[in-house]
Image (cartoon, rainbow, N blue to C red):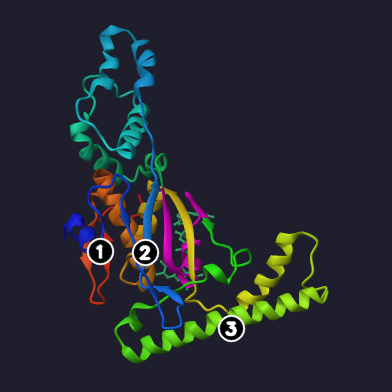
Amino acid sequence: MDPQTVYEKLGGSSDSEFPTLHSEVARTEGETPYLRHPGVILIAKPDVDIEGLRPFLEGYGEELNFDAYLDDPTPLPPGSLLLKTAGQTCYASFGPKRTYNENAQRYFDNLSSSGHGSVFEHAVFSFFVYGVSRAITHEVVRHRAGTAFSQLSQRFVSGKVLRFVERPEYQDVPTLHKRFEQRIDFLAREYDEVAEELVELQLQGDPRLVAEARTDMRKRVQQSARSVLPNEAETTMVLSANVRAWRHMIEMRTDQHAEREIRDLYFRIFLCLRLLEPMLFGDYDIESFADGTYGATTDWRKI
Ligand SMILES: Cc1cc2nc3c(=O)[nH]c(=O)nc-3n(C[C@H](O)[C@H](O)[C@H](O)COP(=O)(O)OP(=O)(O)OC[C@H]3O[C@@H](n4cnc5c(N)ncnc54)[C@H](O)[C@@H]3O)c2cc1C
């Protein structure tokens, strides 16, 4: 299956240098906002310029012709250029016998197939993620090596930014969909009413709710009121990882045994990375599952 076709089918815009798959916001009759699938926005990628190596390369003398390394006519995407430069540093592969950029795919395939994954740790890509439930981000943050997470705090934000995520299994089943909408209307109201009661108690000086700092006052209310929020409350996060970690997470989380919503999230991230850096994610095949989701599989797992 062609990644570009799947990307466009999922609503991706083809001309962006920062691939993005958005998620629309729906509303119940009671005006409670909710989303139906993850939104992923690439917000950061490596900025690479190796021209500064010139004096260093020239320092080896003309006979080695190392400075011609910088005149390779084939441009590479930033992550690929960074990784190839890092890898070729290991063997001082700057001379005419090196692998040129036009054969970079073969170079990365050699690294992947032989498990030299540490080179892939140099390039970091960051995504803003929304339209995901607290249930699955609890699983996302279990990944440690090579990752960084910043997630919306339910202690800090108020009900004004409260949104929900509808399970795919409910979306086209009228009874389940109706229950979902009724439930989140109720829960949004319940959250507001519980918070209001807690503020009242705070104003009366309840020591469990009173704090010195203004932000702590708000936190004391919200850390308590959030107890009524369900797994289907939406969260947002910035999720950064290096290529080695992305590959591992994509393999684990788009697997057929992975949870459906998390598979949807990581497949969308995979598509964005695949389009931007075809050489670093080009060994993956896309498979489609009966539930309408996709997965990405490779022979070179956990490089
Ligand atoms: C389908 C599925 C079902 C799951 N079910 C459960 C469940 O029921 N209960 C549950 O608690 N969790 C569950 N998990 C979570 C799982 O056990 C891992 O915690 C999670 O996937 C993170 O992956 P990782 O361990 O590879 O860590 P990552 O942080 O992604 O690390 C990548 C790799 O680095 C190495 N590494 C990282 N940290 C260390 C370390 N401290 N020491 C040595 N090597 C390290 C390991 O080789 C690791 O695989 C599930 C995951 C999946 C995909």
Determine which quarter of the picture holds residue 50.
top left
Question: In the picture provided, is 227 more to the left or to the right than 242?
Answer: right
Specify the amino acid type for callout 3. Glu
Which comes before the other along the chain, label 1 or label 2?
1
**Amino acid found under the numbered disc labelled 1:** Leu
Q: CA distance from mark 2 to mark 3?
A: 29 Å
Query: Mark 2 Cα within 10 Å, few/some/many (few <14, many 20+)?
Result: many
Comparing 25 with 257, the one in front is 25
Q: Which residue is mark 1?
A: 10
Secondary structure beneath dot 2 equals: helix
Question: Does residue 153 sit above or below 198 in this rendering?
Answer: above
The one of 43 and 296 positioned closer to us in this rendering: 43
Identify the magenta region: 126-149
Q: Is mark 3 within 8 Å of ligand 1?
A: no
Examine the image and state in which quarter residue 38 appears: bottom left
Location of residue 33 by image quarter? bottom left
Residue at the spot of label 3: 190
Of circles 2 and 3, the one toward us is 3
Residue 297, image x, y percentages: 26, 60
Pointer 2 residue? 265
Q: Is residue 116 left or right of residue 241?
A: left
Residue type at tag 2? Leu
Whole-percent x and y of residue 209? 77, 72
Tags 2 and 3 in contact by the CB under 8 Å rule? no
Give the mark nearer the N terminus: 3 vs 1.
1
Q: Residue at x 41, y 39 (%)?
A: 122
